[in-house]
Amino acid sequence: MLSIGHQAMRAARLVALIATAALALAWFVVLRPTSLGGTAGYVLVSGPSMLPTLATDDLVITQRQDRYSVGDIVAFQVNDALVIHRIVAGGPVGGFTTRGDHNLVEDGFRATPATIVGKAWFRLPGVARWILFVRQPLPLAICTWGLTSFLLLRRWGRKPPAAHAEA
């Protein structure tokens, strides 16, 4: 017979498993990056060109769209760089004219549906600063060491299940 505490622990583990599966499914459907076949793009904003709408160190999540129109903020490839600016004119056939909200002049290139990663969907102010910090070798090594240590100590710290005597 299982004790009440053991049943509660099993129920908690089941709830945690279901919540984890739901989060993984949500990420797969909504936040999976385009490099993995999804519709999301991630832009680490740097520079003042989109002030006051977007600031340096903002993380912008974009979503690929079927159509883009004037007024949309889009991320697009220019050579090896990812630019995030607003569409101010044009269309899918001849390309879109873009400009940063803080800039007085349009960009000297046109974004096309093939170069557009997606439309700005969600902004996380200041998050890019932390992502850039953690991606450096020393903080990444410390985070990896800490997580590995936590998982190993958690595993080794478990007591083996007590044998239940049959009466």
Image (cartoon, helix red, strand yellow):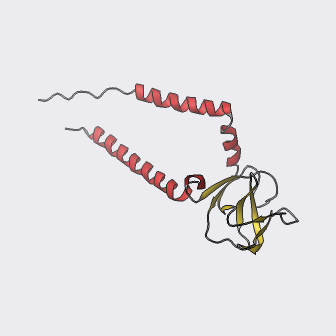
- Image point (82%, 58%), residue name: 49
* Quarter placement of the C terminus: top left
Q: Nearer the viewer, residue 75 or 57?
A: 75
Residue placed at 35% from the left, 46% from the top?
14
Q: Residue lying furthest left in this view?
A: 167
Q: Is residue 28 left or right of residue 84?
A: left
**In terms of image quadrants, where is residue 141?**
top right
x and y percentages locating residue 11 in the rendered image? 33, 46
Image quadrant holding the N terminus, namely top left
| Quadrant of residue 99 within the rendered picture | bottom right
Camera-side residue of 18 and 33: 33
The count of marks equals: 0
In x, y percent, where is residue 26? Answer: 49, 56
- Quarter-wise, where is residue 72 in the image? bottom right
Vertical relation: 38 (above or below) 136: below
Q: Nearer the viewer, residue 32 or 103?
A: 32
Q: x, y percentage for residue 21?
A: 42, 51
Horizontal arrangement in the rendering, residue 103 relative to residue 67 (left or right): right
Where in the figure is residue 151, as x and y percent of width and height? 47, 31
| Residue at the image point whose x is 76% and y is 74% from the top | 90
Query: Is 65 on the left-hand or right-hand side of 75?
Result: left
Of 114 and 124, nearer the camera is 114
Q: Is residue 24 left or right of residue 56?
A: left
